[in-house]
Image (cartoon, rainbow, N blue to C red):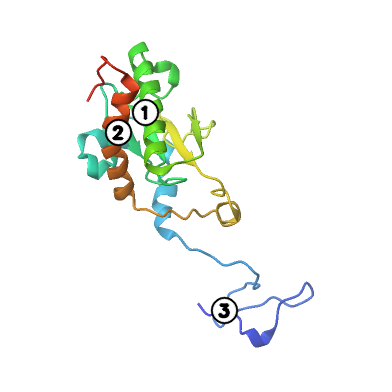
Amino acid sequence: MQEQSESAGPAGPGDDAVTDDFGLAGVPDAFQRLWTPHRMAYIKGGQHQFKNENDCPFCVAPARSDDDSLIVYRGRSVYVVLNLFPYNPGHLLVCPYRHVPDYTDLTVEETAEFGELTQTAMRVLRKVANPTGFNLGMNQGVTGGAGIAGHLHQHVVPRWGGDGNFFPIIAQTKAITQTLGEVRQQVADAWPQQAREQSGPGETHAE
């Protein structure tokens, strides 16, 4: 679709409606558009639509390879995976294997490992990416902002000074500097050492 010719001049408040060569209405403005139609399938599907283990991405992921599912660590009852739509590079999700929606649904053992892997995730990200801060959070329920509300997951988002600049705020766009595969490999490779250091002398950590 062609835009209005520059010779026509900017459209002012009193100007008639502007059309392009095809006769479609539109008034030129100062904004550029970054078209991302590939995300429409994800948006229209609605993450909260996943109701059970058969179609839940967090239930399906552990059955695939770590590379395919972007899993960085598998624990006894909880695993850690990269977010497919990261806010920042290294955006991790801590998930129980069980398909439960609420934090209060976790057993005592699951809760302990959930917290342990969250701590390890922070240590690993500090080691490989040197973030200066973190956002940790669980959105509970659709009205609480949960994307996939049927399966509990906690976000671990590394933060750096300036990562909240005008680009994500104005353009709703994030510039991600590494591929998900590269980030997954870095985090997975660094995980064992950080887990051992976290466990301390004489303690063992589930592999």
Which residue occupies the foreground of this view, 170 or 187? Answer: 187
Residue 163 in picture, x, y percent from top left:
53, 49
The tag earlier along the polypeptide, 2 or 1, is: 1
Badge 2 amino acid: Trp
Residue at x-position 34% and y-position 53%: 179
Q: Judging from the image, what secondary structure is the residue with disc 3 in?
A: loop
**Mark 2 in CB contact with mark 1 (< 8 angstroms):** yes
Q: SS of the residue at dot 2?
A: helix
Quick check: 126 above or below 5? above
Residue 28 lies in quadrant: bottom right
What number is the disc on residue 3?
Answer: 3
Depicted 54 relative to depicted 101: above or below: below
Q: Earlier in the sequence, mark 3 or mark 2?
A: 3
Inter-mark Cα distance, 3 to 2: 51 Å
Q: Residue at x 40, y 48 (%)?
A: 42
Pick out the residue farthest to the front. Answer: 201
Read off the residue under disc 2: 191
Please, what is the three-letter code of the amino acid marked with disc 1?
Thr
Q: Is residue 34 above or below residue 86?
A: below
Q: Nearer the viewer, mark 3 or mark 1?
A: 1
The disc at residue 40 is none
Q: Residue at x 33, y 46 (%)?
A: 183
In depth, the one of 179 and 148 nearer the eye is 179
- Name the residue tied to disc 1: 120
C-alpha span from label 3 to label 1:
52 Å
Quadrant housing the C terminus: top left
> In this view of the protein, can residue 54 be seen by the observer?
no
Tell which circle, 3 or 1, labels the residue nearer the N-terminal end.
3
Name the side, left or right, on which 23 lies relative to 45: right
